[in-house]
Amino acid sequence: MPSLLKVSINPDDEACIERLERQFVRGNNECSQQVDEATVDAYKRLLKPSIETEFAAQSKEKADEEAIRVFTENLRQLLLVPPLGQKRVLAIDPGFRTGCKVVCLDAQGNLLHNENIYPHPPVNKTGEAASKLRKMIEAYQIEAISIGNGTASRETEDFINSQSFDRQIPVFVT
């Protein structure tokens, strides 16, 4: 699947090198040319890639935190929906590449368990995902399954409906 979002940092190389030279290159003597060349090399070969990597990691961390916040709020709203009443729920946030985020909640909406399953491409761990679902449904006495309406929701609903559980469990797409 092609990448839809790309994050990059493009520092002003000249300004960065100039700042490093001001700090490390002193005077104009026989060593200053060597130190100047070493400074430029260190920036281009070591510092710049390190800065780019650190920026990407921080950006991903912030994006992950925001995704979790949105998922939490969506799940909270889902739990406030009265038709289910006080039931133990297995809620799924469907996804392809990053897998389906699954949480098990008690009748009061308290988190009992969470993990990811990967029933869809590109990972395709369908058997493992089915086994994990059965174990969670049994262990937490799940009474209803709720699937978020978004990317991979139809595929996730089809996957859930293709599974046979030890009892009839209603499935909702919200």
Image: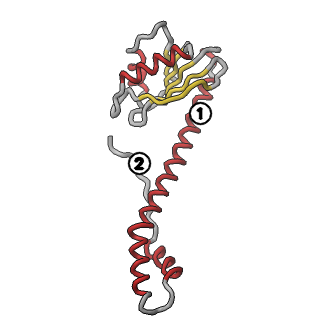
| Residue found at the far front of this picture | 31
| Residue found at the far top of this picture | 167
The image shows residue 123 at horizontal and vertical percentages of 35, 32
The image shows residue 24 at horizontal and vertical percentages of 50, 80
User: What residue would you read off at disc 2?
Assistant: 5
| Residue found at the far bottom of this picture | 29
Amino acid beneath label 2: Leu
105 vs 23: above or below: above
Q: Is residue 109 or residue 37 the one in the foreground?
A: 37
Earlier residue among tags 2 and 1: 2
The residue that appears at 45% across and 10% down in the rendered structure is: 165
Q: Residues within 10 Å of mark 1 (few under 14, many from 20)?
A: few
User: What residue would you read off at disc 1?
Assistant: 72
Q: Are marks 2 and 1 in contact (CB under 8 Å)?
A: no
Q: CA distance from mark 2 to mark 1?
A: 23 Å
The residue that appears at 52% across and 47% down in the rendered structure is: 61
| Residue found at the far right of this picture | 108
Q: Secondary structure at mark 1?
A: helix
Amino acid beneath label 1: Thr
Camera-nearest label, 2 or 1: 1
The image shows residue 128 at horizontal and vertical percentages of 39, 23
The residue that appears at 61% across and 26% down in the rendered structure is: 111
